[in-house]
Image (cartoon, rainbow, N blue to C red):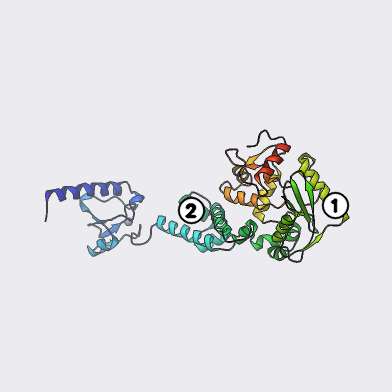
Amino acid sequence: MHSPESDIARSSQDDVLWTALAARDAAADGRFVYAVRTTGVYCRPSCSARRPNRENVSFHASCSDAEAAGFRPCRRCRPNEPSRAERQAEAVARACRLIEEAEAVPSLDALAEEVGMSPFHFHRVFRTVTGITPKTYAAAQRAERVAAGLREADTVTQALYEAGYAAPSRFYAGATERLGMTPNAYRKGGLGARIRFAVAPCALGAVLVAASERGVCAILLGDEPEALTQELRQRFPGAALSPGDAAFAEWVAQVVGLVEVPARGLDLPLDIGGTAFQQRVWAALRAIPLGTTATYADIARAIGAPAAVRAVALACGANRLAVAIPCHRVVRSDGALSGYRWGVARKRALLTREGVPDPE
Ligand SMILES: [Zn+2]
């Protein structure tokens, strides 16, 4: 059973193992251990102990093999316990699961505590292992969930909410100012809110203007007044809708003016609503100068979440204040117009009115 060929194979394999040992190559940890006859101890390849003489060394495929041969584990490199890299990978995997399963993004402190590291160290380890920060991972995870949720949910806003963008804790401070409704009313589709609305003709078809007590809460574009009213009802299922009065007609006229001549701007209070994430995206949209366009990636960068391009696109789609929040100025990175909540033809018309040359 003993051939010269297998001796040669064995000795050349031992050379490879010896080279890893001599280099204290951590990448070899877990692939084999080495034992030293003179000390009776076995180590992982990366052990910082003094390098043994090669003639005293034997190689073993596993800790149990080394122990079966009568060796005990080194107290320095603890070859029979998970390595630092393994412990870190395990901690990161656990943190990822926590992020995936949590309703709202767990704080850095909470994640770090859960895996038994300081927040600073945990952040560094997570980044080293995954190449991204926990926050970016959470954003990507949420974008995935939104995409999955869209198949189930009625509206983009609902999908975003269910994906956790609307973490209630983010809402409590100053929530009424931001939302124009209490958080609970917002979650229930504007339950208890009083919303006035009117539909008027405009150059782009019909425009529905709606306002809560806080300000303009919807500007919707379409062909059929009835369909626009239906859309308003879907967006605020819990609100009491009533037709606007004569004073409200003045607001409607201003919005029509904005649609026809975007350069006029809009001097009305807005009730923007949305989640914290959506509000950041919408603020960035309002910063795109008249007559220019930006890509979804530009917006993602502008809000400091360059990896969240898909979530940005969804937030653009969830905008319910057409033209006032100029989501029509966002185009694909190849310059193509891509989609628009109220139709690509209207997007093109709006950009043409603003003087964007030849929107595709
Ligand atoms: Zn050791």
Q: Is 266 or 206 nearer to us in this picture?
A: 206
Percent position of residue 45, x then y:
31, 52
Percent position of residue 312, x then y:
61, 49
Q: Residue at x 61, y 44 (%)?
A: 338
Could you classify mark 1 by the number of other residues whose Cα lies within 10 Å: few (under 14), some (14-19), or many (20 or more)? Answer: some
Badge 1 marks a residue whose secondary structure is helix
Q: How many marks?
A: 2
Q: Residue at x 70, y 53 (%)?
A: 320
Task: Give residue 345's quadrant in the image.
Answer: top right
Q: Is 180 or 171 nearer to us in this picture?
A: 180
Q: Is 288 or 136 nearer to us in this picture?
A: 288
Which residue in the structure is indicated by mark 1?
249
Please identify the residue farthest to the top as the structure is shown.
Answer: 357
Percent position of residue 281, x then y:
66, 49
Which residue in the structure is indicated by mark 2?
125
Amino acid beneath label 1: Ala
Could you classify mark 2 by the number of other residues whose Cα lies within 10 Å: few (under 14), some (14-19), or many (20 or more)? Answer: some
Amino acid beneath label 2: Val
Q: Which quadrant of the rendered structure holds the C terminus?
A: top right
Residue 64 seen anywhere in this rendered image of the structure: yes
Task: Compare marks 2 and 1 and give the one earlier in the sequence.
Answer: 2
Q: Is 1 or 276 nearer to us in this picture?
A: 276
